[in-house]
């Protein structure tokens, strides 16, 4: 009879990430576990594992993008696994939501990213696997191990296949300059930075370009695209300044509000994203690269207690 160390791990999916979880489970080599969710008439819901997880390593896959039900479902599934005597419970969050609230930027506001981290641990997570956090220091909000993956391992081969001879990497804001410089070092390209000022969240009052893009094939890199206001404004300015083409690479495609319309009507030639968040609709300008193999490989390494340092290109 196998020991608890030899038992096959189990993978379960929150509803919002079921499509991605199926691909991860297939790449990992185990079937996706059976979860049934009961819903009350007032909207309250209860997930139930329909198979034993006692003594097992359990992976629960779910992005926690708004609405809040996505986070709540992850918390309930973690709690259910803990109460069902799972040995290890890894929360796999392809997109870690609420991460933009990682500090107090004015008085009397919450630090939501810290709150979410504590809620995940309290619910039962013994390990976190996530990708391209909005700020690297969010890892410090956890007392449990965090495997912070970078989508550069997915995007860089795609960029190289484009074969752009006049490549310039750009950051759409000052905060993303570190990410842009990391890409540029690997690709041996120039860097330009956009400087923006906001009236309020998601509203840009002014934008300037630091650097020369004339005759260049520009690739904007960012961790997420929400309303697409910053990206499209940056692309339009760059084309006005003589850029040959502008593409954007954003790990998490939130794409809220009028984002799809902005992208379609912008100077962006292409927006490349991962499937960490399911798209609301398809667009000829949006290309999706799967992160399933990256997560499956890292989960295999976690299961075997192996190093994952080979998964970091940045």
Image: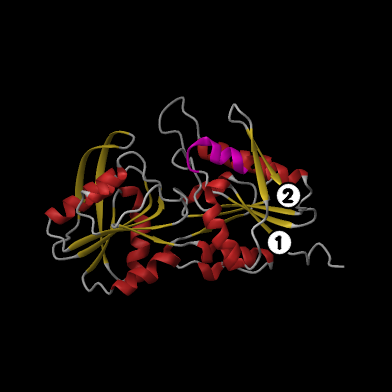
- Residue wearing tag 2: 50
Q: Residue furthest top?
A: 108
- Residue wearing tag 1: 9
Give percent across and percent down for residue 302.
65, 63
User: The C terminus appears in which quarter of the rendering?
Assistant: bottom left
Q: Which type of secondary structure does the marked residue at label 2 adopt?
A: loop
Give residue 28's quadrant in the image: bottom right
Whether residue 259 is in magenta: the answer is no
Looking at the picture, tell me which residue is in the foreground, 68 or 144: 68
Q: Is residue 78 left or right of residue 19?
A: right
Region of the chain picked out in magenta, as a range:
65-74
Give percent across and percent down for residue 187.
33, 71
Whether residue 69 is in magenta: the answer is yes
Q: How many marks?
A: 2
The secondary structure making up most of the magenta span is helix
Packing grade of label 2 (10 A; few <14, some 14-19, many >=20) is few
Q: Using the numbered discs, state the Cα–Cα distance from disc 1 to disc 2 in whole angstroms.
A: 15 Å
Packing grade of label 1 (10 A; few <14, some 14-19, many >=20) is many
Give residue 212's quadrant in the image: bottom left
């Amino acid at each position: 009879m196998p020991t608890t160390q030899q038992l096959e791990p189990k993978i379960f999916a929150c509803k919002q990430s079921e499509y991605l979880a199926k691909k991860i489970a297939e790449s990992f080599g185990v079937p996706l576990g059976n979860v049934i969710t009961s819903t009350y008439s007032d909207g309250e819901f209860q997930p139930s594992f329909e198979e034993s997880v006692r003594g097992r390593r359990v992976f629960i896959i779910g992005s926690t993008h708004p609405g809040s039900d996505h986070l709540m479902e992850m918390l309930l599934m973690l709690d259910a696994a803990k109460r069902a005597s799972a040995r290890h419970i890894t929360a796999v969050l392809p997109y870690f939501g609420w991460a933009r609230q990682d500090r107090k930027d004015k008085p009397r506001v919450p630090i939501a990213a810290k709150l979410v981290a504590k809620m995940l641990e309290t619910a039962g997570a013994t390990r976190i696997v996530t990708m391209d956090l909005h700020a690297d220091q969010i890892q410090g909000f956890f007392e449990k191990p965090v495997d912070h993956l970078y989508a550069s391992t997915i995007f860089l081969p795609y960029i190289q296949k484009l074969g752009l001879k006049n490549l310039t990497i750009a950051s759409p804001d000052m905060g993303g300059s570190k990410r842009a410089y990391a890409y540029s070092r690997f690709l041996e390209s120039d860097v330009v930075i956009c400087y923006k000022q906001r009236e309020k969240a998601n509203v840009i009052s002014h934008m300037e370009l630091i650097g020369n893009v004339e005759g260049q094939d520009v690739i904007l890199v960012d961790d997420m695209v929400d309303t697409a206001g910053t990206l499209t404004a940056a692309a339009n300015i760059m084309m006005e300044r003589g850029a040959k083409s502008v593409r954007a690479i954003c790990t998490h495609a939130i794409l809220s509000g009028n984002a799809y319309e902005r992208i379609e009507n912008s100077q962006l030639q292409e927006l490349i994203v991962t499937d960490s968040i399911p798209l609301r609709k398809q667009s000829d300008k949006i290309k999706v690269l799967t992160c399933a193999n990256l997560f499956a490989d890292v989960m295999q390494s976690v299961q075997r207690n192996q190093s994952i340092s080979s998964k970091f290109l940045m």
